[in-house]
Image: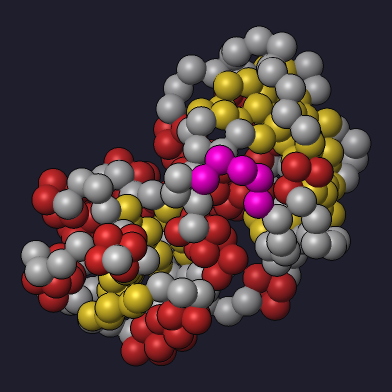
Amino acid sequence: MKGDENKRRLLLVDDDPDVVWGLGRLLSRSGYVVTTCGDGSEAVHLLGQRSFEAVITDVQMPEVNGLALTEWINQNRPGTRVVVMTAFGSSTVQEIAHRKGVALYLEKPVDPDLLLRVLGARGRSDSFSGVVEDIDLFDYVQLLLVTNRRAQLEVVSSDGLRGKMYIDAGRVRHAECGGVQGEDAFFSCLRFHGGRFASVPWQEPPRETISRKGEYLLMEAARLKDESEREGRGRPPSMVPPAVLDLSEMSWEIPDSPTSDQRGGSSK
């Protein structure tokens, strides 16, 4: 019984009381035992007293920030997963977070469906179902990688350019886009403007063209995303699911130009 309780125990660390209340309430209603605190130093004290399945932490906090807390957890509680969230995201912060071993990097406002799916995915290999609202292709690929899912994605841009990605056990094994294959094809798919993507029944990739780790690919994709936005070429598409379907054959429509209202406001 005690072991089962520990598996459902989460530590939520944020100095914003509104985030603590809102996210803590969501997680509690989803069946987790949630302990909260407002700073990394307090979190270290709590982690020394009991075990947690995962720690969800903000980045910017007084005294001990979220990245320093992540490093402490990896050294002292290596079996505990860490989810980092921030209202001041950038490719640099994301790169540092992945290097420190976070399970998931999220920008505020946090997508609750994505967070709950990652938290509930440990030890499961079956496909999941349900609605994921306003999901970004980058976020979905990240979800597949950090939860070690297997998926074959087919992506079509608004101007008809087609791409495929084969993701398996935390790796991108192969990608193709137009006449390009490998890493360049993977990055091209993530930069599509408008269109749709679908998770289709798995088939072994025709070849393996990508060998680098998934976390490197995510960091590089985030860097290219930032460059694209700075140069005014637009943002990666936001994927909106049309219905409640099994993810083995789920499809989304990508709006051409998501607005800030669609994405929601940003809070600390």
Query: Where's residue 146, x and y in %?
Result: 47, 43
Give whichever of 77, 18 is nearer the camera: 77
Q: Determine the residue positioned at 37% across, 59% down.
A: 83
The furthest residue to the top: 207
Q: Determine the residue positioned at 52% across, 64% down.
A: 116
Give the image's coloring scheme: secondary structure
The quarter of the displayed image where residue 264 is located: bottom right
Q: Determine the residue positioned at 76% across, 51% down.
A: 246
Q: Is residue 67 magenta?
A: no
| Magenta segment | 124-128
Q: Is residue 11 left or right of residue 157?
A: left
Give whichever of 25, 4 is nearer the camera: 4
The quarter of the displayed image where residue 261 is located: bottom right
In the rendered view, would you say 7 is above or below 39? Answer: above
Query: Where's residue 10, x and y in %?
Result: 32, 69
In the rendered view, would you say 24 is above or below 112? Answer: below
Visible in this render: residue 145?
no
In what quadrant of the picture does the C terminus appear? bottom left
Query: Where's residue 249, x and y in %?
Result: 81, 43
The furthest residue to the right: 160
For the stretch drawn in magenta, the main secondary structure is loop
Give whichever of 103, 25 is nearer the camera: 25
In what quadrant of the picture does the N terminus appear? bottom left
Query: Where's residue 101, x and y in %?
Result: 30, 44
Q: Determine the residue positioned at 35% across, 76% down.
A: 33
The quarter of the displayed image where residue 133 is located: bottom right
Q: Is residue 126 magenta?
A: yes
In the rendered view, would you say 63 is above or below 198? Answer: below
Visible in this render: residue 17?
yes
Report the number of discs: 0
The furthest residue to the front: 1
